[in-house]
Image: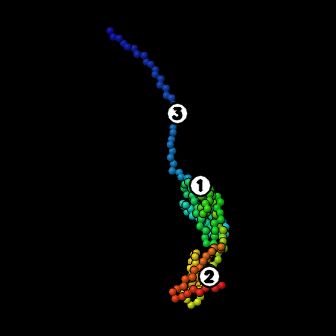
Amino acid sequence: MKKWLLLSAAIITIMVFAVTVPLYVRASSNYTSTYTVNLTKLGTGGGTITPSTGTITWSGTSGTITGTVSSTLYFYVTPSLGSVFQSWSGCDSVSDNGTCTLSLSSDNKSITLTLGGISTYVLTVIKTGFGSGTIVPSIGSLSWSSSTGTATYNSNQSLALYPAADNASRFYFWPL
């Protein structure tokens, strides 16, 4: 006798659920923050400003420097002959020697240097007489044309002149 196995069809329901899983992305960028510093030179004096990094582009008495943000930028001032450092404004700090310290960010910054003019005087020395020799100042040097020597000095600057006669000559005196 044969037995038949009767299988009933079962309905299987498969349910698919959509699950949202947060996705964390680690992004890296080649974006580099930059800065722009606007500079202005004021006053009656002249001189140069040298940054610790980069180059200043000048148009008259206004300049700009741009670059990649680093922690600090320094500006060094060198007054020209007849000029003197007076002040900086817009710096985070200013040292005794006139160095401006500026902490950089991506924000634009503006700084101003003021240089004052001081009076300069031309010293003229004339060698007279029959002998020969040199005259040496304690500061700077004399530019000679024949027997006349000249040099430029700032006001309130003290110096001494030292005559040095050649072997066959002798220094007599400074005329008044």
The earlier-in-sequence mark between 2 and 3 is 3
Tag of residue 20: 3
Instruction: Name the quarter where the N terminus is drawn.
Output: top left
Q: Amino acid at mark 1?
A: Ser
Name the spot of residue 158 as percent of width and height, x first.
63, 74
The earlier-in-sequence mark between 3 and 1 is 3
Q: Amino acid at mark 3?
A: Thr
Residue under label 1: 103
Report whether residue 108 is seen.
Answer: yes
Residue 90 figure quarter: bottom right
The earlier-in-sequence mark between 2 and 1 is 1
SS for callout 1: strand
Examine the rendered structure and indicate whether residue 76 appears above or below residue 70.
Answer: below
Residue under label 2: 124
SS for callout 3: loop
Tell us which disc is closer to us: 2 or 1: 2
The alpha-carbon separation of the residues under discs 2 and 3 comes to 92 Å
The answer to whether the residue labelled 3 contacts the one labelled 1, judged by CB atoms less than 8 Å apart, is no
Residue at image position (62%, 84%) is 174
